[in-house]
Amino acid sequence: MPTRRLFASSKTGGVFLLSFLLQTCPEKYLPAYYTIKLMMKKFLLLIREDMGRLAQMSEEEMQQDIAEMNGWVEELIKFDSFVGGEPLENESKTVGKPIATDGPIIDSKEGISGYMIIQAENLEQAAAIASQCPHIVQGKINMEVRPIMEIPQES
């Protein structure tokens, strides 16, 4: 059973031991896999891109983009990194008061076109995972990677 999907680099003895057990013990005898998954943190990937480019894409270009993203998501699933995500519709509505900013307001055509939730050891690993997205490599999108805050459950 490959451990790369769970720990690309770990320095703690406990993590090393669990990693070693996963390499040497059959999964049916070792529930530690699920314990390790609980140790992973979740991260939100906010996908931003030029909304004008999206609106002008042909059906063929759209299908090509979808196929590329689906291929990348399949890789994330293989390594238990993918938790979920969806594309967003182009239409939006803002509610609440505008937030005051220092400096000029920049008119941008960039918008949030989707989101993903992944699992990783830390922010650096999550950013490295995001950087492998084919649309980032091609310069079509950027992603903001944010740790999801864990709220302790009350007993």
Image (tube, rainbow, N blue to C red):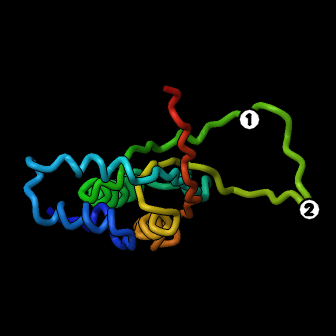
How far from the left and from the top, in percent, is residue 65?
Answer: 39, 58
Residue at point 61%, 58% (across, down): 50
Amino acid type shown at disc 1: Thr
What is the distance, in whole Å, between disc 1 and disc 2 at their CAs?
A: 21 Å
Mark 2: give few (<14), some (14-19) or many (20+) Cα within 10 Å: few
Name the side, left or right, on which 153 lies relative to 14: right
Local secondary structure at mark 2: loop
How far from the left and from the top, in percent, is residue 55?
Answer: 56, 50
Local secondary structure at mark 1: loop
How far from the left and from the top, in percent, is residue 96?
Answer: 80, 32
Q: Can residue 67 be seen in this view?
A: no
| Residue 146, placed above or below residue 91 | below
Amino acid type shown at disc 2: Gly
**Which residue is at the front of the view, 137 or 28?**
28
Name the side, left or right, on which 81 lies relative to 113: left
For residue 103, the mark is 2
Residue at point 64%, 51% (across, down): 111
**Which residue is at the front of the view, 9 or 102?**
9
Residue position marked by numbered label 1 in the rendering: 94
How far from the left and from the top, in percent, is residue 102?
Answer: 91, 58
Whether tag 1 and tag 2 are in contact, CB under 8 A, the answer is no
| Quarter of the image where the N terminus is located | bottom left
Mark 1: give few (<14), some (14-19) or many (20+) Cα within 10 Å: few
**Which residue is at the front of the view, 57 or 49?**
49
For residue 144, the mark is none
